[in-house]
Image: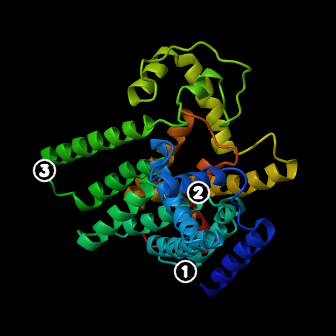
Amino acid sequence: MACLLVVWALMNGYLLRAYGVVSAVGEPPKYVFEAETLIRTGHLTSSNYWLYFTQIALLAVAIRLKISLFFVALFQLSCNLLASIYFYKTLLYIFHREKVAFIGTLILLLNYPYQQFNVYLQTESLFYSLTLILTYFVLTLEKPDGKKTLLILLLLGILCITRPTGLLLIPPIFLYVFFVLLKKLSPWKKVGILAAIAVTFLFFLNKAIGSGGELDFMLPFRDERIICGVPTLPGFVPIKTASNPNSLYGLLYYITHNFSQFVRLATLRTLAFFGLYREYYSTIHNICLMAFFYSLYALALAAIPFWLKNQPYILCYFLVTILLIWITVMLSCDDWHNRFYLSISPFVIILSGRTIASLTKTTVDG
């Protein structure tokens, strides 16, 4: 573990030296502005920013106390370090082998695009870290435990106001807990609980979609953008939309009334999401990116039979999370810097753990 801590320090030391604390370019300025607005007026410019409140609150505290924004980056780095430790513990819990935990965590620490967000004062670093910490406590919940359950709910709540996609962790968490802890419930009780959770999730998801501000879920279809913020058409194409397009009903209406366009755009966004290739990256950048992540794809896919046979509930947790984020991309657009994919990249590393164990001659229990 000491070796991994050294790698973490070297990686993040390099990032701080190379980029400093990034607050004036890209996404960070809008969160800084919202923090200043919150201090000045007591509210945010738009209700959708409450779904990014964790980052805004941290910046507001730093600005209010008149301390350097470096302390916000330091908090992000501390969370990232804690998340790296819990990632190691997650691998150790699943595979019971220190070698697999070490290699998997080393791969995470060398995931340069993922780690790069630690010095950017935007929501990704905290979101990534909280996701890994939350995942550890969910997967280690083997029996009813009030304290751990409260901690999981607290972390999930914070995650949901760090980025809207935090809501997408609700179904996989519930399904995992449902399958592991509620096996003995009667079928009718199971159906009732599933229905109640599904209705609650869809209600909050619909609220998030309709939270306003800069969110316009039909815009990526009107100008057929694959990458967010990059229209592929000079103007808008006519599409059929509902009276309230920023809603679950509006998305369903769009799909059923513009099916051919949806399928075409969903395919292109899928290729961008999993393919990772970007025209504006240099050749060497694309080669390194694809070599790193495509290798993990191969390792993870080779391990699927093991997961299905030995750890189906853990597999369900990871695959449902990946599926929901993938669907979100298909219904909107992919990120310029692969941020949406990077949020699930640690799960791909974990899924590849069985193959890593085989390649390193390490026997995995189960």
User: Disc 2 marks which amino acid?
Assistant: Glu
Residue linked to disc 3:
186
User: Disc 1 marks which amino acid?
Assistant: Glu
Q: Secondary structure at mark 3?
A: loop
The residue shown at (48%, 48%) is: 44
| Label 3 Cα crowd, 10 Å radius (few <14 / some 14-19 / many 20+) | few
Q: Secondary structure at mark 2?
A: helix
The mark nearer the N terminus, 1 or 2, is: 1
Number of marks in the rendered image: 3
Residue linked to disc 2:
124
The residue shown at (59%, 53%) is: 31
Q: Is residue 159 left or right of residue 77?
A: left
User: Disc 3 marks which amino acid?
Assistant: Ser
The residue shown at (51%, 14%) is: 240
Q: Residue furthest right?
A: 283
Query: Which corner quadrant of the image does residue 296 belong to?
Result: bottom right
Nearest to the eye among marks 1 and 2: give it.
Answer: 2
Indicate the position of residue 26 as horizontal and vertical percent values. 70, 50
Residue linked to disc 1:
98
Q: Secondary structure at mark 1?
A: helix
Q: Quadrant of the N terminus?
A: bottom right
Nearest to the eye among marks 3 and 2: give it.
Answer: 2
The numbered dot on residue 137 is none
